Amino acid sequence: MSQQKTYLKDPFDDAVLIILAGIDHDVERGEDMLMFGLCLVMLSSTFAPVAPPTVLLPLVALTFAISASCARKNYHNMERKLSASIALLEHHEQIMLRPVAAVFAEHPMPSLADSFNLLKNLKRTLKSVLGGFLINPLWMPILYVMGMQICEEKNLGILNRAIIDVERRLADHPPAWLKQRLISDKLTD
């Protein structure tokens, strides 16, 4: 299955709305990935009576790592597809999507190799070591990847707020091409 490289299809009308709908869908997909991982972790306590902590806790860390990694790949794909889509737009349409594109510029996400590198994330590493000392050393990897998960959720929330702001701005002050589209839709109904 080949991945789509842009949010726009060949004949595109209302490109801004199509891009907003596409990126909103991808944000929801990223949130679903993170929520699925969290739900699996929450369900892991049901296996506590039969699985020893030396088996269960590494599986919890692996679950968090997989869900955060999938969400990170989704975030990078959104960034790539948005920049490719914006390049196809006219200047006035690019201006409308600038707040969404600014989120990717202001909150860049490092690669997965950098995220899993303990030395490049000293603050997260120290927090997980401290938590491991306070709780149990087997919790250190869980706390480390949980920090990745929280970072992913935070960035998706910021991106979601930017999309909502652009949608509100379009609804409150629609550009001329959108006004004409709304008028023609009302006439055909």
Image (cartoon, rainbow, N blue to C red):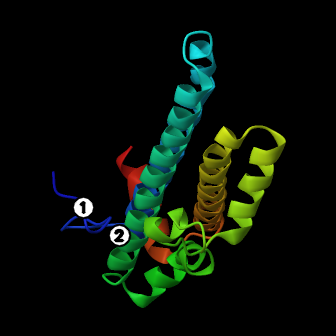
Q: Are marks 1 and 2 in contact (CB under 8 Å)?
A: yes
Q: Residue at x 18, y 68 (%)?
A: 10
Crowding at mark 2 (Cα within 10 Å: few <14, some 14-19, many 20+): many
Which numbered disc flags the more N-terminal residue, 1 or 2?
A: 1
Q: How far across and how far down the image is residue 169, in percent? A: 64, 68
Distance (Cα) linking label 1 and label 2: 8 Å
Decide: is 113 above or below 32.
Answer: below
Asked where in the image residue 127 lies, by quadrant, the reply is: bottom right
In the rendered structure, which amino acid carries the disc numbered 2?
Answer: Lys
Read off the residue under disc 2.
81
In front here: 68 or 137? Answer: 137
Report the number of numbered marks: 2
184 sits left or right of 43 in the view: left
**Residue at image point 79% right, 38% down:** 135
Where is residue 18 shown, x and y percent of the image?
38, 61
- Which residue occupies the extreme right position in the image? 134
Left or right: 97 as drawn, with respect to 135? left
Q: Nearer the viewer, residue 23 or 141?
A: 141
Q: Secondary structure at mark 1?
A: loop
> What amino acid is at disc 1?
Gln
Residue at image coords 51%, 51%? 68
Q: Nearer the viewer, residue 49 or 18?
A: 49
Q: Mark 1 — residue?
A: 4
